[in-house]
Amino acid sequence: MRILWLLGGWALTSLRGGGRMIIFLGTALFWIFLPPLKWRRMIARIHFIGAKSLVVILLTGAFTGMVLGLQVFYTLTKFGSEAFLGPAVALTLIRELGPVLCALMVTGRAGSALTAEIGIMRITEQIDALTAMALNPMRYLIVPTILAGLIAFPLLTAIFDLVGIYGGYLVGVKLLGIGEGTYFGEMETYVDLWDITQGILKSLSFGLLVTWVCCYKGFYAGYGAEGVSRATTEAVVLSSVLILVWDYFVGSVLL
Amino acid sequence: MSGPMVEMRNVHKSFGGQQVLRGVDLQVTQGEILVIIGRSGGGKSVLLRHLMGLLKPDQGQIVINGQEISRLRGRELDQLRERFGVVFQGGALFDSLTVFENVAFPLREKTRLPEEAIREKALTLLKQVGLADMGHKYPAEVSGGMRKRVALARALTMEPEIVLFDEPTTGLDPIMVNAIHRLILDLHRRVGFTAILVSHEIPEIFGIADRVAMLHRGAVVEAGTPEAIQASANPVVRQFITGDPEGPIQPD
């Protein structure tokens, strides 16, 4: 009986939380289409989410590509088909690892900071101050951030993919001795435009997902330093889990 | 104008089963400085939030200039908010903007004034609060007293009719407390807004208030001139203004 009680309570709380999150997203999307757009804030956000994540993306992209080059080569030699290293690395990156790893890295670097920033604005009454001035916090804080995510994520993913492919090239061609022409030639044959489109669609959806979750968690942060730290942790965990879950479903639908 | 400018009638509010306001009745006349005193956590900030339209009462009415505000939404609510200036407890300055940009912010966002006029107006306001040379600093780089003064300047930029102060002097040294009070009085005389102040500063607030209202357990137990409050026979009011730990109010 007690277990049922607890289970019911848990279900209700999560349902209420989920509903609030969806309403939050709905309101934000509504304000996106209502001009004027706060350009400067959006550009500042793109700089924060995008430009400042470059180093992390370059490093992780390069090493992911190199690891792929190594491991896929090892696997392919078992079937004697090392020639397909190029397309294997490229397809893995473009369709799957690029968007996903990029989103996970940006969540860790920028998403957590976004939640903390918005959370601190909440607890120091800066969000209330906006409302009290009859300025809509959605328009000033949330809309620019979500749009920045939609712009920055695909760009970062493209950079991740590119660097990763060159990482694979470095290992596969320079280290393990596959022909340069084979690496890129086979890639050209086997990677379709649809693969690239799919990767970009994924990264767009991740951009929305991450900024949505991180903004929401900050916007409804609890009181004090503890509230903000909890919001930040929850934002990173929830974003990361949702990225992987969503990735599976989008992948199975788009395939 | 006849009748009170702001009137709260039997306002109730509770959060998750905890009753914070239990039937607040309060009237504010145009042009006066009303100070609300009461214990921490006694619902004073919650009361102010109702006036800004940040919270809606569970029961009761809030009437401002004859307009019932708890039913307002969207555009109408914004129009109401534009008549208020708010000085938040911690200042609530935007920490990504400098002191000057904070004061200029409402002008930049809400008016189409040319940059020149905005500069001039913001500088005048900063001068009035004695911070003309602090404009380039960020809120984190100035002292607590300065932050409160910046918040005051920002609250006045749009020339509000009513200014709400949420503990404008809490955490400041006695000299700064009096300096801020004098500043409020001075600006009040010059600009002529109606002020509603929430404060713990006893006895200092008796020097600036036109009227004082004591909020206790979610209701106004007594309201009157500073003299009347100081001479009150109500044991709750007496205990609060003398700060006696023994009496009807039990420290938790």
Image (spheres, helix red, strand yellow):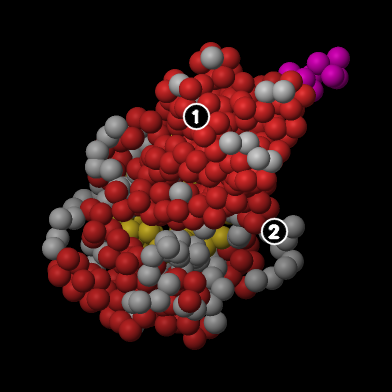
Secondary structure beneath dot 2 equals: loop
**Is residue A62 one of those drawn in magenta?**
no
Cα–Cα span, label 1 and label 2: 88 Å
Task: Write down the chain letter for disc 2.
Answer: B
Residue B198, given in percent of the width and then of the height, sits at: 47, 62
x 54%, y 70%: residue: B170
Residue A61, given in percent of the width and then of the height, sits at: 58, 44
Q: What is the quadrant of the C terminus of chain A in the image?
A: top right
Residue where numbered disc 2 is placed:
B248
Task: Write down the chain letter for disc 1.
Answer: A
Query: Residue A13: in sight, yes or no?
Result: no
Residue where numbered disc 1 is placed:
A185
x 35%, y 43%: residue: A139
Secondary structure beneath dot 1 equals: helix
Residue B142, given in percent of the width and then of the height, sits at: 47, 78
Residue type at tag 1: Gly
Given residues B53 and B47, the one toward you in this image is B53
Given residues A1 and A62, the one toward you in this image is A62
